[in-house]
Amino acid sequence: MFYKALRISALVAAIALAVGVTFGGKVSALFQGQQATSQTAAKGGERKVLYWYDAMSPQHHYDKPGKAPDGMDLVPQYAEDNASQSPAATSTSEPGGARKILFWYDPMHPAYKSDKPGIAPDCGMQLVPKYADDETATLKMPAGTVKIAPEKQQLIGIRSATVERQSLARTVRTTGQLTSDETKLAHIHVKVNGYIDKSYVDFVGQLVKKGQPLFTLYSPDLVATEEEYLIAKRGAKEMGSSQFPDVAQGSQSLLHSTRERLQLWDISDEQIKKLDETGEVTKTLTFYSPVSGFVTDRKAFPQTAVTPDMDLYVISDLSTIWVNADVYEYEVPFVKVGQTADMQLSYYAGRTYTGKITYIYPTVDPVSHTVKARIEFPNPNFDLKPQMLANVQLKINYGKQIVVPQEAIMDSGDKQYLFVVHDGGVFEPRVIQMGAKLEGNVVVLSGLNAGETIVTSGNFLIDSESRLKSAMAGMQH
């Protein structure tokens, strides 16, 4: 019997639990409805309920209590609460310093206006009062200026900052390629037809010094000119004292012309002097390097016929090296000739080279949309070699500029603006001209002065208020 009674008790408890789950919400709602009804009883009667609404979506109204779609209890809207929603709700100008209300308007459709508080017919939202002092505070300010109460500023999280001039510097990181200094390239040619007899510099990459012999040349024209020179010299000596002036002058003119021809063929004064001293024609003449550097190209080989148009040697002086660095278009205005630049090479890890910008090329690469900046580096030990790739840092100094946080700027596409804070909670939209962007900040070129205060956070909500006011002002005209 004891166990049977225990089973019956357990069954009764389960049934009670199921009933509670099924009808608990209704019982609770009934209890809440009774409680709300009892609370509506005022000293002189009951409070009048206009409608019930969803606390999470106030625009949804219902004609009886119950549950909202989100599961929350509907909240009653009492007539006396609606009529007293603001200190000046019952009159457009109450005594005692109350704010004067010009009209009420639908916040979603500002064109709808009413002379008394209530509900907007389209969206079901509460009408918003338009105060007279709001118009007075922003009457002389630019279009879109709004006034926001301190409690509302705190609610939407408005933060501000004072504008300052700051010294700005930036490092542009890019890549570059090393190349020879084009102003120190020497191309070796002969100015007379002939044949290479001997080649003293016989491989590409060989370091030569200025005045070092490169090759010897046999040229029939050169030999003939040497013979003419010796004959003219003997004739000038024999006929220089002739009693006939024309003969003496002719011999001197012939000597001068043959000597000048040898010089035009790059025969040095020392070689002509040796020809004067020995009086013997030299079958081959030696040509010497006009500069010091490395041989980067060679076409002078023994027993090879050569002509004046042949590039026999190309000698590069690598005591200085060029680096052509790529700079993006928007960075070009800040890159100037004379600026310093640092360079690192994977070839020499951990070593930094410092050079100067000597030229900015006038064309833009159509593929990468970059401009090449030429940087010159000293190369005393020949560590820097043409065709190497390098990492380059260009140091850009912007000087002292007005700088604002990037999040403070509103960008509408055709213009950029921000909000300037004035006394009394007044916010003025100010169009600005933007400059360079760097590290989360923006340089302001015009439209803003140092010492002014701007909004740095919450500006999207202020922008909504500003656009709303501008729309309302446009509808009034």
Image: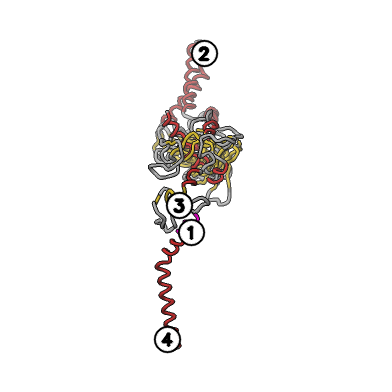
Residue 268's mark?
Answer: none
Residue 35's mark?
Answer: 1
Nearer to us of marks 3 and 1 is: 1
Residue 40 seen by the camera: yes
Tag 1 and tag 4, C-beta contact below 8 Å: no
Confirm whether the magenta stretch covers residue 213. no
Which region is colored magenta?
33-39
Residue 242's mark?
Answer: 2
Return the x and y of residue 219 as percentages of the image width and height. 42, 33
State the CA–CA distance, disc 2 to disc 3: 140 Å
State the CA–CA distance, disc 3 to disc 1: 12 Å
Question: Circle 3 is placed at which residue position?
Answer: 76
Callout 4 secondary element: helix
State the CA–CA distance, disc 1 to disc 4: 42 Å
Q: Main secondary structure of the magenta part?
A: helix
Return the x and y of residue 326 as percentages of the image width and height. 47, 41
